[in-house]
Image (cartoon, rainbow, N blue to C red):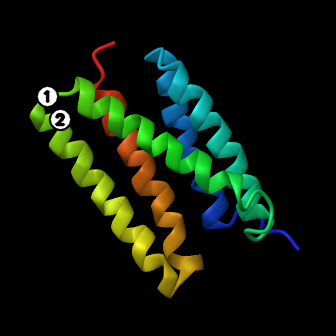
Amino acid sequence: MKRKFTDFIIWNHIFFIMDIAYAAVKKDYILLILGTSTIYLSIERHRHLDKKYNTIEPIVAKSTMVYITARGLYEFTIYQKQILLLSEVISIFIHHIEQYDYETIHPWIHITVAMNIHIYLSCLLT
C-alpha cells in the first residue's frame, strides 16, 4: 500500500521544490544537489509508508540542514544567523514532538525546513 500524492505528507514537498529552484537561481549547487536528492528520497520514503529509503533519506536530509547551518554561520551577519538558528530550533522542536502523532505532525517539519532553506537563500549574497 502507498500513500496518495494528495496526502498532506506528500504534496507539501512542493515548498521544497520552490526553494530548490531558488537555489539554482542563487547558484548554490551544493544545496541544489542535496535538496533535489532529499526531495526525491523523502517523497519515495513517505509514499511507501516510511519503509523505503528509511536509512539514507534521514542522513541526506540532515546533511542538507547541516550544510545550510554551517554556511549560514560562516557567511551571515549576527542578525541573519539568529533568524536562521531560531527557524531551525522550531524544526527541531517539531521533530521532537512528532513522536506523539507522526502522521499529523511530521508534515509540518517539511514546512518549517522549507522555511529554513528559504531564510538561508534569502540571506545569501550571491
Q: Which residue is mark 1?
A: 77
Could you tell me which residue is drawn at 64 percent across and 44 percent down? Answer: 39
Q: Quadrant of residue 20?
A: top right
- Vertical placement of residue 116 versus 49, above or below: above
Q: Amino acid at mark 2?
A: Gln
**What is the total number of numbered labels drawn onto the structure image?**
2
- Vertical placement of residue 32 versus 106, above or below: above
Could you tell me which residue is drawn at 32 percent across and 53 percent down? Answer: 88
Name the spot of residue 117 as percent of width and height, x first: 40, 40
Could you tell me which residue is drawn at 62 percent across and 65 percent down? Answer: 9
* Image marks 2 and 1: residues in contact by CB distance under 8 Å: yes
Q: Quadrant of residue 4?
A: bottom right
Residue closest to the eye, 12 or 50: 50
Q: Residues within 10 Å of mark 2 (few under 14, many from 20)?
A: some
Q: How far apart are the alpha carbons under marks 2 and 1?
A: 5 Å
- Vertical placement of residue 83 versus 3, above or below: above
Name the spot of residue 18 as percent of width and height, x first: 52, 35
Q: Residues within 10 Å of mark 1 (few under 14, many from 20)?
A: few
Name the spot of residue 46 as percent of width and height, x first: 71, 63
Q: Which mark is residue 80?
A: 2
Visible residue check, residue 118: no
Is label 2 in a helix, a strand or a loop? Answer: helix
Visible residue check, residue 100: yes
Q: Which mark is residue 50?
A: none
Is label 1 in a helix, a strand or a loop? Answer: loop
Q: Amino acid at mark 1?
A: Thr
User: Left or right of 65: which side holds 72?
Assistant: left
Q: Point out the image quarter for the C terminus.
A: top left
- Vertical placement of residue 95 versus 44, above or below: below
